[in-house]
Amino acid sequence: MRFLSVNLNAVLVELDDLAQTLALLASLRAEPIAGVEELVPAARTILVSFRPAAISAAALAREIGQRSLDARETRIDKRIEIPVRYTGEDLAEVAGLLGITPEEVVRRHTGSDYTVAFTGFAPGFAYLAGGHPSLNVPRRAVPRTRIPAGAVGLAGSFSGVYPQASPGGWQIIGVTDAPMWDLARETPALLQPGDTVRFVDVTASEVSLPVAAQIATAPVPAAIEGGCAFEVRAAGLQALWQDHGRHGQAKQGVSASGAMDQRALQAANRLAGNASDTACIEIAYGGFQFACRGEAVIAVTGADGPLMLTRADGAQWPLPRHQPVALADGDIVTLGEPAAGIRSYLAVRGGFAIAPVLGSCSTDTLARIGPPALAAGDVLPVRAVASGAVVGTPEAAPVDLPTVHEEVVLDIVLGPRTDWFTADAVERLCSQPWLVTPQSNRVGIRLAGEQALVRANPSELPSEGTARGSIQVPPSGQPVLFLADHPLTGGYPVIASIATHHLDRAGQIPVNARIRFQPIAGQGSGLGPVEL
């Protein structure tokens, strides 16, 4: 085994092959290690997230290093056929890479069984091993910003089906209407590790394929009669439900998501007298307005921007952030454009009456799991205030929130794939500023630098787990900084990760800001790489 630093709370365990990876995974699931919070298996690695207060990285490596690689998970296998129309936009390019005709690509893709090795990237996305050995092609040099739902693709030696529209770098050879992920099913993911899969060519068939199921979301309940509710007058650029996140769901291919600025979420709830992980409204770039029906106590934290109250009689005055504010029936609250930071958090005493999905109210914009984004006209009922819900005292506003006027410095931990890049590239990562492009969102920040990062190792990296804060570098050399809604796995090397104490800060960086990365001493977990 080889242990690689990922961040202050994560390590990557590298093994020889998929069989060893699945054996170690079975052992860690059968006999969990205290302090381990999440396991993300991939082709030859397992990403292990842990609580540093419960176990050190060195102790974790010793514990894992003693595990046998002979264990196997027991499950009931099943065989699934997936009908495919082989009309993918990369089919001809794949044929050219392999030196065969497109028809031969289809024949080879449909001529063998596949096995679900592991899940990741997105809910319902399964990495399918096996098939014809010649179907081994690299990912695209520049990943697409949108691949349609049902797209059937190749990457390295794996095949896979995109459960829904998302960014991605796989070579697309076809499309299916078979739903890969459906929360209405008892087991949402169609494909589970160990299943046998066969692709069937229906390109010329007249048979009508099943319609892909829509991703189920939690409905926003109607207003509670006689209680308090907020009526959304304007939603702004983006207003989402967010809480602590959907942790512990990696086995289903589901990432945590959650608030981009966790400390701001906790502060808003603390001020409103709620539990720290109660769902709040995360508002990006202001422009949000609501009317209060009934009486309520709110708190707004996060970004620094104007907050205005308009009373029912038309009188107006500014409201303070970072302290509890009492609202009367008919009051209208407006959040303006932030001067620093970009995301505000609105909490209400008692919490909003919103139904969770897979244990969380967070909206995952990549996986499309959770309640829908808020829109003008929505009515948001407020739960009754629990006994003992005491509001907090005013708190100091956060200092040094990111703006477009000054470089934003972020601490980073180098690894796990720093050695895949030239020494000049590693130096350049930290010496030149990186522009935050408009193609940035909750999934990640796409960065642009004057000089691209050059790889020393041109090989195709087998897919491996990625953590929030990972700085992944596609062949273009322009990095992508993964944020809350990032995919669980990726196929481009991660040169470094944002240190855990700067993740909230990263979630407040505006478009067109410039970032400078600063390596921290001690290299995070303190692991080398370490060989066992």
Image (cartoon, grey):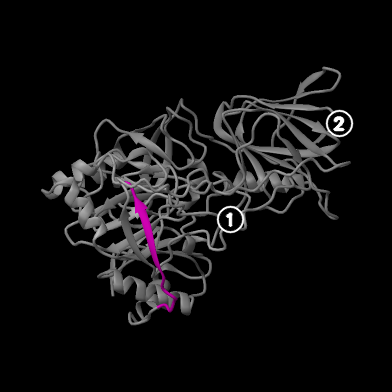
In which quadrant is the C terminus drawn?
bottom left
Image mark for residue 145? none
Left/right placement of residue 146 relative to residue 289 reads left
Residue 177 in percent (x, y) is at 42, 48
* Residue at the spot of label 2: 329
Q: Residues within 10 Å of mark 2 (few under 14, many from 20)?
A: some
**Of label 2 and label 1, which has the lower sequence position?**
1
Label 1 residue SS: loop
x 33%, y 38%: residue: 144
> What's the distance in space between the residues labelled 2 and 1, CA to CA?
38 Å
Find the magenta span and give its range.
Answer: 73-85
x 23%, y 55%: residue: 419
Q: Is residue 117 above or below residue 222?
A: below
Question: Which image quadrant is residue 119 in?
Answer: bottom left
Is residue 247 inside the magenta stretch?
Answer: no
Left/right placement of residue 217 relative to residue 197 reads right
Type of amino acid at the residue the image marks with label 2:
Asp
* Residue at the spot of label 1: 184
Residue 124 in percent (x, y) is at 45, 56
